[in-house]
Image (tube, grey):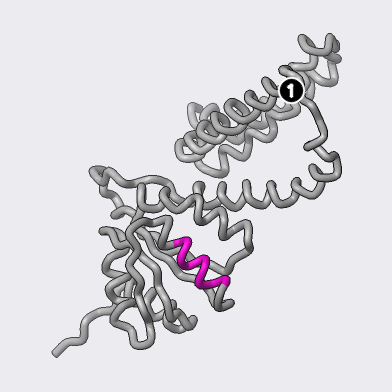
């Protein structure tokens, strides 16, 4: 009798068991159910079935904090993964050793309705958490709780929250998905251009020829990196 060929899921099960995984908190869906079922068959591995993806990650977070071991949680892809953002943020803020196994959509399946780009969501969770942790001590030095903000400050805060943060992140990740990580990083080259141009109407500054030349060099560089002009030839 021919032995069954090992699949990628089998290898992942072996990897988690080899790392000493004893507890798995999961809510199964089509993208992770075979792996979760295979984990349940491993000696010494206990699988806890949650009723919500957030609860699965929260339980893995609590397990890691209580035992000092790595917490392991699993969700399906798409909406299943987006449900864990709050629990994932709390774990990241606490520096909890946590691994989330989230299955992905079938390769090349254009009909798959739950497909989303999950990596930027996880990356954003870590970025925002790290930024908040770094800025909190500096903000405390200013003792903001003693301030009495006026309507201008409150309006600016609302604008920062809704436009510069919420809308900006939605736009950023839409562009990230459409253009790719490499191309979207080129937008950092436009920061000095936009800030210089905004200084003209807002601060009454006058552009010098050196600034115009610098912006022209940046524009030329972006066109060359884009490559479409060269391909037309």
User: Measured from the top left, where is residue 7 in percent x and y?
Assistant: 30, 73
Q: Residue furthest bottom?
A: 1
Residue pictured at 43% horizontal, 81% vertical: 22
Task: Report the front residue among 206 and 151.
Answer: 151
- Does 97 sit above or below residue 177? below
Task: Name the side, left or right, on which 154 lies relative to 87.
Answer: right
Whether residue 144 appears in magenta in the rendering, the answer is no
- Does 115 sit above or below residue 228? below
- Residue range highlighted in magenta: 57-65
User: Measured from the top left, where is residue 213 in percent x and y?
Assistant: 79, 21
Q: Main secondary structure of the magenta part?
A: helix
Residue pictured at 49% horizontal, 81% vertical: 19
Task: Name the side, left or right, on which 82 lies relative to 113.
Answer: right
The residue wearing badge 1 is 153
The part of the image, by quadrant, that contains residue 168 is top right
The part of the image, by quadrant, that contains residue 17 is bottom left
């Amino acid at each position: 009798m021919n032995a069954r060929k090992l699949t990628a899921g089998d290898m992942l099960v072996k990897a988690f068991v080899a790392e000493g995984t004893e507890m798995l908190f999961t809510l199964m869906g089509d993208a992770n159910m075979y792996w979760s079922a295979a984990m349940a068959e491993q000696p010494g591995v206990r699988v806890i079935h949650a009723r919500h993806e957030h609860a699965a990650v929260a339980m893995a977070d609590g397990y890691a904090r209580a035992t000092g071991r790595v917490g392991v949680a699993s969700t399906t892809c798409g909406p299943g993964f987006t449900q864990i953002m709050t629990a994932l943020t709390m774990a990241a803020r606490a520096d909890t050793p946590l691994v989330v196994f989230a299955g992905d959509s079938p390769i090349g399946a254009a009909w798959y309705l739950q497909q989303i780009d999950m990596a930027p969501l996880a990356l954003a969770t870590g970025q925002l958490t790290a930024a908040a942790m770094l800025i909190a001590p500096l903000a405390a030095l200013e003792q903001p709780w003693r301030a009495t903000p006026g309507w201008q400050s409150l309006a600016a805060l609302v604008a920062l929250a809704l436009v510069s943060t919420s809308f900006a992140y939605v736009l950023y990740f839409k562009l990230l998905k459409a253009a790719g990580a490499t191309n979207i990083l080129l937008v950092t080259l436009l920061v000095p251009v936009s800030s210089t141009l905004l200084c003209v109407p807002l601060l009454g500054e006058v552009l010098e020829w050196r600034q115009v030349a610098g912006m022209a060099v940046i524009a030329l560089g972006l066109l060359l990196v884009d490559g479409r002009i060269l391909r037309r030839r």
